Amino acid sequence: MRVAALDDDVEELDLIKSTLRAVGHDCHVFTEGAALQRELRRETFDLLILDWHLPDTTGPEIVQWVRNHLQARIPILFVTNRRQERDIVEGLAAGADDFMMKPIRVGELAARVQALLRRAYAEPAPDEQIWERYRFVLASRHVEVDGEPVALTHKEFDLALTLFRNMGRLLSRQYLLEAIWNNNNPLGSDLMSRSLDTHISRVRTALRLRPENGFRLASIYGQGYRFEAVHADDSRPA
C-alpha cells in the first residue's frame, strides 16, 4: 500500500518510513502541509499519517481539507504529542480514523496502520470475485467475460484486478507503477510509463471496457486513470 506521512520532525518521519517499509508498504514523507496537499491533488495514497503541529498548518486542518477535496475516503491516522481527551475528540471530529500518542512505538504503529488498511480495503475471502459480467478467478489468475475466458498476461491480470477493486477512484500513474511493477521512482521512466499505457490499452480492449458494456476506463490528463461503472444509456465517450 502507498502511505503519505506528514511531520515536521525528520527523525520521526524516518522512523515511520522504516517501520512501514518493514511491513511491506511504500511511505512518502512530507514536512509541510502545503507540500502534501499539492501531492494529493495529483497522486494517489491509501493512507495518511499526520502530526498535529506543523510549520504552515495543523493536522485537523489537513484532515478537513482532505475530506472536502478528495473524492475517495482515505483512512487517516494522527500520530501526535497531543494527549488531552478534547484533542482526540477534535481530531476524530475533523474526520480522522485513529489516534496514536508519541513517542512512536514501532509495533503499535505497524498494527494500527495494518488495521486501518484492512478496514478500508477489505478483500473478499472467496477464490473468485465477480463484477456483473466479469469473473476473476484468483488462484488460476484468469478472467471470464460472460462465461468466456479472456487471455491476459499476469501483469494485465494484476492491472485489471486493481482497476476493478478501486472502481470510481482516481489512480495516479505512479500509484499503478508501484502497485503493478513495484517501481518506486517518483518520476517513473519513459519505458515504464509507455508500458503502463500499453497495458491499459490491452486491458481495455481485451475486456471490452466500454460504456455499452457497463464500464468506462478513462484517462485523466496529467493525473492517471479512473475506472468506473456507467449506466447502459450513458452515451459519453470512453
Image (cartoon, rainbow, N blue to C red):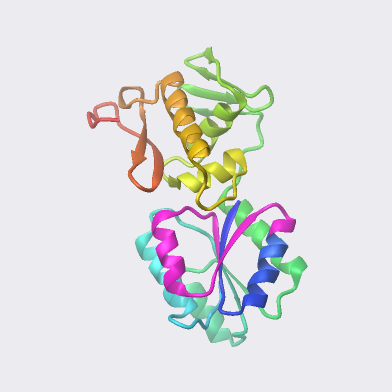
- Considering every residue shown, the one lying at the far front of the view is 190
Q: Nearer the viewer, residue 190 or 215?
A: 190
Tell whether 230 sits left or right of 105: left
Count of numbered circles on the image: 0
Residue 80 visible in the displayed image: yes
Residue 34 pos. (x, y %): 42, 72
Q: Nearer the viewer, residue 61 or 128?
A: 61
Residue 168 pos. (x, y %): 40, 43
Residue 132 visible in the displayed image: no
Residue 70 pos. (x, y %): 39, 58
Report the span colored magenta.
21-49
216 up-or-down from 106: above or below: above
Residue 234 pos. (x, y %): 25, 30
Residue at screen point 75% across, 73% down: 105
**Magenta stretch: residue 43 in it?**
yes
- State which quadrant residue 29 falls in: bottom right
- Considering every residue shown, the one lying at the far bottom of the view is 84
**Magenta stretch: residue 147 in it?**
no
